Image: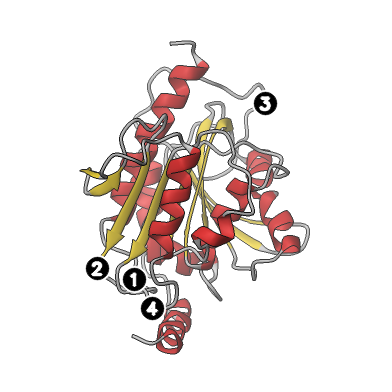
Amino acid sequence: MSPARDLALWALLATLPACGDDESAREARHVYVTPSARCTSPRDRPPDAELRTPEGLSVLVRAPANYQPEVAHPLLVVFAGAGMMPRATERLTGFTPEATADGYVVAYPQHIRPSRTALRKLAAIPALVARHFCIDETRIALSGHSDGGTTATALALDPGTGFRIRALAPSAAGFTGKDLQDFRCPEPLPVRVMHGAKDTLFPGWGRETWQWWSACNHCDLESPATTEQGCETHAECVTPTYYCETAGGHTHWPAQAAHETLGFLEQAMVGRASERNGE
């Protein structure tokens, strides 16, 4: 498929209505156990909310249907592909029901063309959500597809975001290995890179970025990659570092991507929680 046709399909997808989103969000109830963190000042927002940044960007926020305003929840920010509004991103990725059932608050910002100025605006999203919802600021994860994956990756590389990312799961992101050579490795970070084998817009870029993250995460690059949970990984990584290749093209978001990404986030968040508790 040509890049032009990829982009045309992406533009079409962005216009499709999001059917049944509200109902799927309300049905997702979390089983609360003894929480590891609480908010001293409860954030009593309804499970579904539409927030706006000072610049007027729309941010759709979903929380468990039985959201408890005093419990600190992990936050998953899912950035949008080109031209996509929040509900279109929600519909494409399908994170809401399972993520909120797992106890996440999920934020879907409106798309904004990637730039330095845009990154500063989008970097403020976690703080915006935390002003209205009870968020565990030690458990913030980023994901997104296409421009969304590019944005998530860029924020993970930017030391000036104002928040610490605990896990990264970009899909079809627009970074090459050569691009990343200009960046300094952040602290070891759990990363799950998703990319389509038939992506003609960014051909092979996902594997290149995975190799860069593998070096940053001190993996043994001399050993052959092995398969774990359906994804490739190197030995000796200090934190989970996966490359998950799908059969589709640039606009393809696999049916199981949300479920598998949430499994990865659980693995990443548990490890971080253990570090925080001194275990």
Residue neighbourhood size for the residue with mark 2, other residues' Cα within 10 Å, grouped as few (<14), some (14–19), many (≥20)? few
Comes first in the chain, label 1 or label 3: 3
Residue type highlighted by circle 3: Ser
The local secondary structure at tag 2 comes to loop
Q: Which mark is residue 200?
A: 4
Q: Which residue matches tag 1? A: 252
- Determine whether label 2 and label 1 are within 8 Å by CB: yes
> CA separation, marks 2 and 1?
9 Å
Residue type highlighted by circle 4: Thr
Residue neighbourhood size for the residue with mark 3, other residues' Cα within 10 Å, grouped as few (<14), some (14–19), many (≥20)? few
Q: Nearer the viewer, mark 2 or mark 4?
A: 4
Residue 29 in view here: no
Q: Nearer the viewer, residue 57 or 22?
A: 57
Q: Nearer the viewer, mark 1 or mark 3?
A: 1
Residue sitting at x 41%, y 82%: 6
Residue type highlighted by circle 2: Ala
241 vs 107, left or right, is: left
Residue sitting at x 68%, y 50%: 123
> CA separation, marks 2 and 4?
12 Å
- Determine whether label 2 and label 3 are within 8 Å by CB: no
> CA separation, marks 4 and 1?
12 Å
The answer to whether residue 63 is above or below residue 84 is: above
Residue 193 in view here: yes
From the top left corner, tell me how far across and down residue 55 is, in percent.
77, 63
Residue sitting at x 46%, y 36%: 217
